[in-house]
Structure formats: C-alpha cells, structure tokens
Amino acid sequence: MKSMLNVALPKGRLGEKVYSMFEKAGFECPSIKENNRKLIFENEEVGVRYFWVKPSDVAIYVERGAADIGVAGKDILLEYSPDVYELLDLNIGKCRMAVAAKKDFRYDMSRTLRVATKFKNIASNHYLSKGMDIDIIHLNGSIEIAPILDLSDVIVDIVETGTTLKENDLEVIEEIVPISARFIANKTSYKFKSEAIDKIVKQMALEG
C-alpha cells in the first residue's frame, strides 16, 4: 500500500484556496467537498490524507509529526518559530504585519511604549531592534479598541485592507513584514518522504 502523506489544512477561506491548489496539482480528495462534519479525508489512490485544523495550530501538527506537511501563515511562523522546513511561499492570503496608532500619534522616547497585540514575539523583536522599551498588552481580539480607550499607544496586528483601522480613526505608521501562506514540512517526514513532498512543492510552485 502506498504510504500516505498527512496534510494539515487551515480551516476557512484560506484552506479552501489551498485545497484547490492541491487538487489542481493532482492531489485531489473528492470527499473533502461533501457537506459533513468530518475532519479527516483521504484518497489512497493518490496517497494523501487531509485534515482541517485551526490556522494557528497547523504548525504544531507539522512540527510534532501528526502532519507531514501543511500550510501556515508567515505570521504564525514568525510568532512561534516552529522547528519545520518552510519550502514555498504560496503567494496567497497576502497581508502585512504592521504598527498602527491614532492619527496624531508620535513616539515619545522618554517613556515606555504600550503595545497591544496578540503577536507578542513579533512586536518584541521589532521594538528590540529599535532599542525601544515597551510594555506588551496581550489581547486576543478587537485590538483596534486598545488605543481608542487609551489602553495602549499603538497596536501590532495583521492588516489586509486597512478598512477597520480607518473606521476607528487609526492608521498604519510602520510596516513590519509582508505576510502570506507558506508550505511547511515536518523535518523527519521530509527526510523519509522527500520525493513525494518535492513533487507536491514543484506542482504547487507551478500553480502559484
């Protein structure tokens, strides 16, 4: 029997886009499109087994070997630094990690900067590189409210269109890094299944 490649797909719109890239690359699994609550789908003929997981968990499944390969946002890879191979930028799910603040905001070097974010490592590294002293306020959602309610001076977050910022009278004051979906592989899996993984990477690169 053909050895199966376990693939962790991020749930949601991005995952659907990613799956259609796998499908076009010849790694289809028709049962994934059925309307049911199953989480694991396989196609023995082409040797793939897909499963849906929360986008921020993909890298954990891949790093720990429950998945051989997966697709994760560059934001997750930068924030958690999982021990995986990053093999390909899929050029989808594009956005940017940025610093935003109220429109009249100016840095005041005489005091500690309050930064609201759910990406505390990205924010810390960014300001460390500037030699700035910061106080991180870890929030999980509605980060835009923090500067409005004077909980923080700035926020570090993912920005796609910038509409939410504009509607809340905030603006991007600095771009930290561009973000997109990346194809990642477990290091041990890559050693033993490199031929199959490279074949997918090659096909996906052609799709991109």
Image: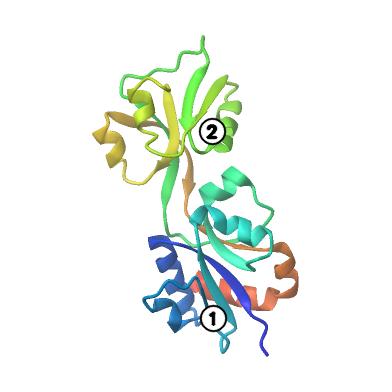
Disc 2 secondary structure class: helix
Where residue 123 is drawn, which disc sits there?
2
Density class for disc 1 (Cα within 10 Å; few <14, some 14-19, many ≥20) is many
Q: Which mark is residue 74?
A: none
The Cα–Cα distance between marks 1 and 2, rounded to whole angstroms, is 39 Å
Q: Earlier in the sequence, mark 1 or mark 2?
A: 1
The image shows residue 115, relative to residue 86, as above or below, that is above
Count of numbered circles in the view: 2
Residue 24 seen by the camera: no
Give the percent coordinates (x, y) of residue 20: 42, 73
* Residue in the picture at 57% in, 77% down: 49
Label 2 neighbourhood size at 10 Å, few (<14), some (14-19), many (20+)?
A: many
Above or below residue 86? Residue 97 is above
Q: At 64% from the left edge and 80% from the top edge, which residue is drawn?
A: 4
Where is residue 83 shown, x and y percent of the image?
69, 53
Where 138 falls versus 112 (above or below)? Answer: below
Does residue 127 appear in the picture of this structure? yes
Q: Secondary structure at mark 1?
A: strand
Query: Is residue 128 found left or right of 165 in the rendered image?
Result: right
- Residue 11 appears at what percent x and percent y? 45, 62
Please identify the quadrant where the N terminus is shown.
bottom right
Residue at the image position 45 percent from the left and 59 percent from the top: 91
Residue at (53% x, 57% y) in the render: 72
- The answer to whether residue 183 is left or right of residue 158 is right
| Residue at image mark 1 | 42
Question: In which quadrant will I find the C terminus?
Answer: bottom left
What type is the residue that disc 2 sits on? Ala
Say what amino acid the circle numbered 1 marks. Answer: Glu
Asked whether 45 or 194 is in front, the reply is 45
**16 sits left or right of 192 in the view:** left
Q: Identify the residue at the far front of this view.
A: 37
Q: Quadrant of residue 103?
A: top left
